[in-house]
Every structure is written in structure tokens, then in C-alpha cells.
Image (cartoon, rainbow, N blue to C red):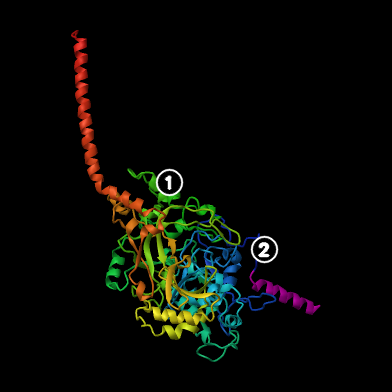
Amino acid sequence: MKKGLIVTGILLWLTFIRPVYAADDEKLLGDESDGSRAIPAHLINLYDEEIAELDKISYKILPDDKPLLPFSTRQTCGMCHSYQTISNGWHFNAVDANVVPGRPGEPWILVDTAIGTQIPLSYRPWQGAYNPEQLGITPFQFTCLFGGHMPGGGPGELESDDMDDIMRQGISGKLEINCLTCHNAHPGQDQIEYAFQISQQNFRWAATAACEFASVSGSAKKMDETYDYLMPIESEDAPTVTYRKDAFDHKNRVLFDIVREVSDERCYYCHSNLDAGTPRGDAGSNNLKRWAADEDVHLTAGLKCVDCHRNDVSHNIIRGYEGEDTASQNPLAAVTSCEGCHTEGRLGAPIPEHPGIPPVHFDKLSCTACHSGSWPEQQTILAKTSMAHRLGTLSTNKAPEALPHIYYPVFAMQGGIGAAYVGGLLDVSSEGKIGPHKLIWPAFWGSIKDDKVTPIHLEVVRKTTSKILSKAKRSRSGDWRELNDELIIESLKALQETAEGAAVYISGGKLHRLDGEGKLIACEHNAAAPYRWPIAHNVRPAAQSLGVRRCEDCHSTDAPFFFGAVAVDSPLATEKGSSKEMIAYQGINRTYARVFAFSFVFRPWLKVIALGCCGIIAGVILLYALRALACVVKTLSGRN
């Protein structure tokens, strides 16, 4: 009898200390608001990750525990919020093949200057981007490369099929969704530390290390396969957690400064953009340009990022492009685009009149074409982004020419949004409008078979070509190593032994391969086309929009909008300095655009002639009107 009571007591105790998991249709305490706009105090217990696989038990963390363990966001936040529902949100669901990919966005860009590689990656099936697995990059390796600017989840929680990765993941843990990345309003939330911890493969410790009341030392990357984080060892390299002494209250709870509406500063860590100028440009002038530039007009007006990019507990965040409602289940997607706000006056948005602008412009151009990004110049400039250049971290290369090379603004036809996705991308909806884009030229080694190019795994390329390509001069600024035809030929011959098909090198918009005599030939190929993605920020007000001065802002024989030079990027010395005309990406006949633009040269004369003719015609009409009036007067006076 006593044994039965003891067992019952233990089971009840376990029930109270473990998180409560809701059924698929059951909502937890924090999943649905009761209507109050007040933010509840998040004075809560910390829980470690599941350590009893069979029972899925998670224990409360106490300040006197030995060893002290990092808290798990899945378990700690999952007490009140449905972790599974949140994990389906846009920031975390890229690895889900059933998710609608939506309009192409910024990819992750893998750069390896040693092997002349710059290639866009994405788990979403965006045209022109490659799935990391195509290059032999496992989810664990992908997280090591890019996890510093990810909010966790996605590839960070996938199980690897690679045995080495399985062993390393057992040491590092999984990179859970870090709710604090966005929702912790405390100024001590340190995303730089978060990125550093991921670089040390401290995945299970990263969220703890980044918050304001804890620190982590040591590196899981340095630990061998026998390491067990639950068994403390005397080593300076072993990951160790230290909680601030006053972090826990008398009930061993911790206070989080949680907010619903995420501050702009939290968004900026992953979504900052910088005009870097031109390669080998003056960094000082770039910094001056940055501080002299105006902020996005919406932010200047007092709006926040989340005023437009909204979501509920599902975290199905609105991206804000026209036609998104056909690809997104978010009910606000249709009314939270440029047109949605500015035709209804939402959030105080002014309703534009566009006096004097022919209606055809609204059929052919997106709103962003005139209002977003930098004012177009004769040559595209380099841009830097947080995701591509690790802005805001300790490893940031501040040189303007540091890879990857992203060019903008490129005015190009916007592609389809992929509203339907069943085993592949179905381009069922295309905006058919020209808008500003960022653009990157892929450079990678691959093989071609039946006219299809497949990237060769990175490790194979490194093993085969690193010694050959090391002969090229290395750039200290992070720019390309300057390759020549001889190095490309030698590398292609070496790769031919392992390639399935003919070995090729993609660079500068061309496919390079060897002919029957072993000579290097180059030709255009779809695989060498640049990857581009539409941009919307920074938004300029009407007074700074294209066309505000006159039609010739776009319709002149040298207008950058149509005839600006899009720089072509390549490590090959023979392809340096080449460019393509902007109109090549707009689906417009170049001759027609030239003739139409040339008409604006004579348009002022045409106006003068037209006004003069109108004056002559008016004089003639007035003359005959007066003569007719004279006849009427004579008739009325009785004279013939």
C-alpha cells in the first residue's frame, strides 16, 4: 500500500514539473489573448531540454544545480505557447517542402574565395537558388555557417543523416527557436554573443548566453565525441553556464522583459542594408553617404516594422508584396501592401493622386520602382546586408569590396510568386511589373549533363582544386582572388575525373568548359544567370521619387532606369569590368525604348510647335468668329 502511494506521488510530482503539451487543436495559455493590451509579467521558471527520451521529462533549473544547465526555449516558453505552431512561421519553415515558397527573397550566400565560389542557397525552391544539399551541405553544417543570423529552428533542429554530424549534434545540441531574439526587450539581449556561441557549436547554450542574466564559456566545437554535457569535467574548453546571482527570485523564477510588438532594433540585426559604393571605393565616403541618407519614410513617420509585417501566434508574418494574399494564409496580406494601405488610408497613409502620370505606369511599374532604394545611377553600386556580410558581428569585414558582391538597384521584371506548390514550383501568378532588385552573380564549379548544370560538392572541389587555385593572388580585403584561364583549365581537368558529365565553371554570367582540344570556351547558360530578389526599403517620399523632376528621369537616352550598367561580377581577370544594360532584365525591346526615349529630346520643341499651332488656329477661329458676328449684326440691323 505504501509502495503504491509512493509511486503515485512520484508520478504526480513528475506531472507538475514537466511542461504541458497541448493537442493539435488545444490552445495554451499564451496562444490566445483575452483582450487585454497589457503585457503580462513573464516571471517564470526555467526548464532544461528533454533529457529523459522515453518520458520526455524536462526539469526545472535551480540556482544550486550542479552542473548548471542552459534553459531550453522549447520547454520554457512551451509551457504557455505552442512551440509547434510557432515553428510553422515564415522565419522557421523554410525546410518544410509543403510550404508555399512565395516571391523570391534574399538567399543565404556561401562564399569561399579559395575556390572562387559565391553561390545563393535556400531551402525554399526559389529559381536560381540552390538547395544546400546539392552542394553536400548538411543541415548541421548549414547552421554552423549561417546560424548567427537565424532565429533558430528550421535546419537547426533537423536530424542529420551524416554520422559525423549526428555525433557532433549530440555534443552541440539542436538550435531551438530563440524566442528572445525578437521578443526580449531588455537591452542586455546580445545577438553578437548569440552568433559567437553558434560559431563555437554551442547550439543548446546560445539562447542562454545571449540573454541578460547568464553567460556561457567554453566551446562544444573543441570537445571530442565522448563529451556529455550532463557530466561535468574539469576543462576550460567545456561549455559552462553561469547565471547572475540575482537572476532567480525566492521561488527560483526568472523575469523576462517580453514584448508582443518587436522593436525595430531587433529586426535590424538580421535585416540591415548598407550602400557600400563601388569596388575599391572610398570607405570614408560610404560612411558619409550612410549618415547623410534619409531613413525610410515610414520609420520617419513613426511606424514600426511590425506595423506592416504583422503576424499572430502562427508567426506567418506578412512580407508585404503585391499579390501575397494568393500565397499566404494571413488575412491581412491583401491590405498590407503599398496599394492596400495607400488606397484605404490605413495607419494614416496618404492617398496619392499622381497628377499627370499616364495610367500605363501603374500597369507596368510596381510602387517600389519609383519610391524604393537608392536613386539609380549610371552604374549599379555594391550593397551589404546583415545576412550576407554578417553585419553586427565580431567577424564583419568593413571593406566595400568584401564578398559576396551584391549589386543594386537593378530595375527588372518581377517574377512569379509561386502561389501553388505541389512537389515543385508552379509559377501561377506573376506580377508582370518592373521593380528594383538586388542581384548576385553565381560563381561555382559544377558538371553539365543533358544541358543541366549540377553543383559539385564543396568538399570535392576543395580537395581537388585548392592547391591549384592557391597560385592566384589572395586579396586582403576579402575580394576575389584573380583567376586566369590557365588555372580554370587546370581545375576543370582535375574535376573531370569526379564529375558526372562535363566539368564546368559558372562565373560572370557564363558557363566555362573545355572543348575537344582542351581549350577553354565560354557561353551563356541559364545556370549562369544572376539571382535577383525584389526590394522595398528604404522607401522615399513623393518629393524624392523617380519622375518628380520631369519625365526624363526615366525617359531619356541615357536614363539609368533603362540604360544603366549592371556590373557583371567574376573572379576571372578577362571578365573584370564587364556589364549589361538594365533593359535586358525588363522584357522590353531595346530599340523601342531607345526610340521612345529619343522622342523626349524633341518633346519640348513639339510642345512649343503645338502651342504655336494652337495659337494660330485660335486666331483664325477668332477672326472668322468676328466676321460671322459682323454678318449677324448687319442682318439684325436690316442691311443686306
User: Residue at coordinates 24% horizontally, 38% vertically from top-left?
Assistant: 610
Residue mark closest to the camera, 1 vs 2: 1
Vertical arrangement, residue 260 with respect to residue 607, above or below: below
Residue 554 included in the magenta stretch of the image = no
As drawn, the label of residue 538 is none
Of residues 523 and 2, the one drawn nearer to the viewer in this rendering: 523
Label 1 secondary element: loop
Of residues 600 and 196, the one drawn nearer to the viewer in this rendering: 600
Task: Name the residue beneath numbered marker 2.
Answer: 23
Vertical arrangement, residue 159 with respect to residue 335, above or below: below
In the displayed orientation, state which residue is furthest to the front: 517
Amino acid at the residue labelled 1 = Thr
Name the spot of residue 532 as percent of width and height, x first: 43, 63
Whether residue 314 sits left or right of residue 594 in the image: it is right
Name the spot of residue 33 as percent of width and height, x first: 56, 57
Whether residue 267 sits left or right of residue 22 in the image: it is left
Residue 6 included in the magenta stretch of the image = yes
Q: Quadrant of residue 60?
A: bottom right
Q: Tell me which numbered mark, 1 or 2, is placed earlier along the sequence.
A: 2
Q: In which quarter of the image is residue 2?
A: bottom right
Q: What stretch is highlighted in magenta?
A: 1-19
Q: In which quarter of the image is the C terminus?
A: top left
User: Residue at coordinates 50% horizontally, 63% vertically from top-left?
Assistant: 127
Q: Can residue 548 be seen in this view?
A: no
Name the spot of residue 557 as percent of width and height, x first: 29, 54
Amino acid at the residue labelled 2 = Ala
Gap in Å between the C-alphas at discs 1 and 2?
42 Å
Task: Name the residue beneath numbered marker 1.
Answer: 343
